[in-house]
Amino acid sequence: TLVPTAELVADAVARGGAVAALNVITLEHAEAICAAAGARGVPVILQISQNAVRYHGNQLMPIVAATAAAGRLATVPVALHLDHVTDEELVRQAAAAGFSSLMYDAGALPYEENVERSARVARAAHAAGLWVEAELGYVGGKPGAPASAHAAGVRTDPDEAADYVRRTGVDALAVAVGSSHAMTTRTANLDTELIARLRARLDVPLVLHGSSGVPAGQLSAAARAGIRKINVGTALNVAMTDSLRLTLAGDRRLVDPRKYLTPARDAMSDTVGQLLDALP
Ligand code: G3H
Ligand code: ZN
């Protein structure tokens, strides 16, 4: 069943837990996520990044239609979120394409420019009925992105964050609290105390990006401290790719994609299941 992102995040806020938001690149990702969520009776957010849209020929339709169909067939509530948008043309297309929310990514820009752009995008997106997330502080680690727009390893400042939320009108804030994108090992170290201070200072839900690199125990601690949406992408790709390498190396004559994508999809589903089991 498809539901709005705002609803799933509001549920997380109400119970003091966190909703998992998983990145979809291929149909197999969407199927794997919905299977794991359905088996546990836990709602999830399926998110498609601008980079994933670029991968699919810079067209929203094919991947969004497939992901939405997987969500509609799911036995649990599923929301569709457009992730890491920098292209304002995509913001304009998001609602019609079927998304109920988006994350506008100006986290790498200097503060005033981030405020100005995010406020403009939030106004436009709200007019289209979308829930809007934006980033302050800089999580970093995205391919091709600058290491940091600020000093290296900068964290989100609570006072600046309060000013940012007030001036942009965003519905949720992605914060830099020690995670980094695209980590293939779980070696990040979160500043849980900073999460608690941000939560106390802000009246919008907090979002954690780059959660693949965070150990499971720290993810549940982050949720207890105030993170309400936990974004995971790379961990699924690690599971998928490890499985593919194994299967393909094990049989040089194998050519039917169904033969190697089935275990790869199962591996992603297991990874999602472990994540869902770790979240309050
Ligand atoms: O927005 C997406 C997430 O931040 C995913 O990060 O690929 O490092 O898990 P990750
Ligand atoms: Zn992210």
Image: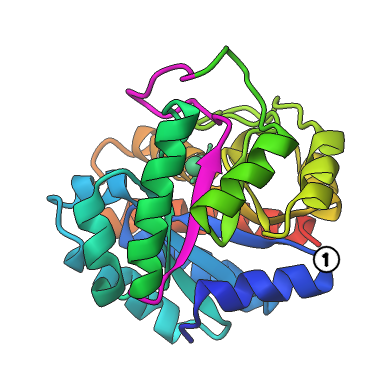
Point 59% across, 68% down: residue: 36
Using the rendered view, name the quadrant where residue 109 is placed.
Answer: top left
Residue 217 or 102: which is nearer the viewer?
Answer: 102
Predominant SS along the magenta part: loop
Amino acid type, residue under disc 1 in the picture: Gly
Residue at the limit of the structure toward the top, as seen here: 152
Residue 225 or 233: which is nearer the viewer?
Answer: 225
139 inside magenta stretch: yes
Residue 172 or 184: which is nearer the viewer?
Answer: 172
Q: Is residue 268 above or below residue 218?
A: below
Q: Is residue 161 visible?
A: yes
- Where residue 27 appears, as percent x and y from the top left, is 32, 63
Point 49% across, 73% down: residue: 79
Residue at the spot of label 1: 16
Give the residues drawn in magenta, as a range.
128-149
Residue 16 or 201: which is nearer the viewer?
Answer: 201
Query: Disc count in the image?
Result: 1
In the image, 13: left or right of 121? right
Q: Residues within 10 Å of mark 1 (few under 14, many from 20)?
A: some
Using the rendered view, name the quadrant where residue 208 is placed.
Answer: top right
Point 35% across, 73% down: residue: 127
Q: Is residue 76 above or below residue 155?
A: below
29 inside magenta stretch: no
**Secondary element type, mark 1:** loop
Point 71% across, 76% down: residue: 11
Figure quadrant of the C terminus: bottom right
Q: Is residue 99 visible?
A: no
- Where residue 165 appears, as percent x and y from the top left, is 59, 51
- Where residue 211 appears, as percent x and y from the top left, is 62, 41
